[in-house]
Amino acid sequence: MANRDPHSTRIGDKELHPESMMMGYGYRPELSEGAVKCPVFQTSTFVFKSAEEGKAFFELAYGLRKRDPNEELGLIYSRVNNPDLEILEDRLTLWDGAEEAAVFSSGMAAISTTLLSILRPGDVIIHSEPVYGGTDFFLKHILPSFGIRVMSFMAGRGTADLEKMVDDPLIAEKLAMIYLETPANPTNALVDIQAVANIAHGLARGDRRPLVAVDNTFLGPIWQHPIDHGADLVIYSATKYIGGHSDLIAGVALGPKALIKQIKGMRTILGTVTTPWTGWLLLRSLETLKLRMTSEMKNARYVADFLADQPKVMRVHYLGRLRENDPGYRLYRRQCLGPGGMISFELVGGEAEAFRFLNALQLFHLAVSLGGTESLAEHPASMTHSDVDPEERMEMGITPNMVRLSIGVEHPEDLIADLKQALEAV
Ligand SMILES: *Cc1c(COP(=O)(O)O)cnc(C)c1O
């Protein structure tokens, strides 16, 4: 134990599971007075042993010379690096099987920094629709002002529209990224990551090809691993399941070493890194990630089955309720490892019925966000998706009678009792 390499992922020839490594991976107790837990390195800057050492660290940080084999980037300044964040990044790579990770001050910081570090004026980005509200605004209103052309196709309808777009050589030649959100929020519509990756690889020209990025916030990192299906980059709002307690805001980007290095360079300059304290909270959260997400998924299955039996409920959108003859079923089985904890459903009626239901809830909290230990309910049409064009919103299936639930770790019978009494109030 004492001499165990903190970056070893095996015992003998047995490969360990990520959940077994969340309590120790990447951390050396002997560097912190033997503390079993990594302390909070609440410091802005780090003392160099000598001027020569400071010079060597900066040469690496600014890419002025090549890294010697086994040479690690020394600690400089907490906008560049910090022990809590480095250990957190190492642990985050394990779930998705990624080479490297970068943590950010929010999911939006991860998304904007990643896209700004890869896209250039004149480039094209194609994204699936719908995407998270902040992402939608960044794509449609910020990127075009930097000379980037933004196009989209609808999730849940195959890749024919995407193929048609890239048939145009002017688009194919300038396409720098395909950005996906699957399952889509709040409808749970799926995009086939492998099919999109195949299209991106088909557009390779020399050593350049469009990158495939996936926002994996809804199912990951437990129930979906986009890199296994050909994605280049995986992005998270760590505010949601990874943080998991609705008490912090953070983000993550994962991918190959060279790409993450480029993204971290932009992160250093934009200053979008997170703080040591948030990093420490995320280390603590990762220890129970699998437990929480498993419990939330089991609860969601009960809740979805209950809702589907209610006469006042018209339709339930939950991946765990897809049946063999449903469109999306085969893709779900191939791409996802479990149905997760997000449910949306449509009440008989309209906004008035949805509001009466939401106002009657007692155990569920009426709030946006998701992925925390407590169950939340919200009204997508008037809250999370209120700035989407009303016509587009209907086309995406976000109707006035739709309610979205994020299922927590409470006892499922209590959740169902609350839903039952709220339905009676409708
Ligand atoms: C919440 C969310 C984001 C944005 O993350 P923040 O941490 O709030 O900045 C991005 N994508 C998805 C799918 C989200 O749910």
Image (spheres, rainbow, N blue to C red):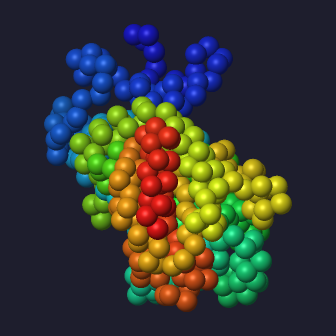
Please, is residue 203 above or below residue 149 in the view?
Answer: above
Answer with the quarter of the image where residue 278 lies.
top left
Residue that protrudes farthest toward the right in the picture? 325
Answer whether residue 50 is visible to the viewer in this image. yes
Q: Is residue 232 left or right of residue 39?
A: right
Answer with the quarter of the image where residue 75 lies.
top left
Query: Could you tell me residue 9's position as x and y percent?
Result: 55, 25
Query: Could you tell me residue 398's position as x and y percent?
Result: 55, 76
The residue at 71%/62% (across/down) is 192
The residue at 65%/56% (across/down) is 309
Q: Is residue 86 left or right of residue 35?
A: right
The residue at 54%/66% (across/down) is 186
Residue that protrudes farthest toward the top in the picture? 2
Please, is residue 266 above or below residue 13 in the view?
Answer: below
Residue that protrudes farthest toward the front in the picture? 424
Q: How many numbered callouts?
A: 0
Viewer-proximal residue among 115 and 239: 239
Viewer-proximal residue among 189 and 424: 424
The residue at 66%/63% (across/down) is 190
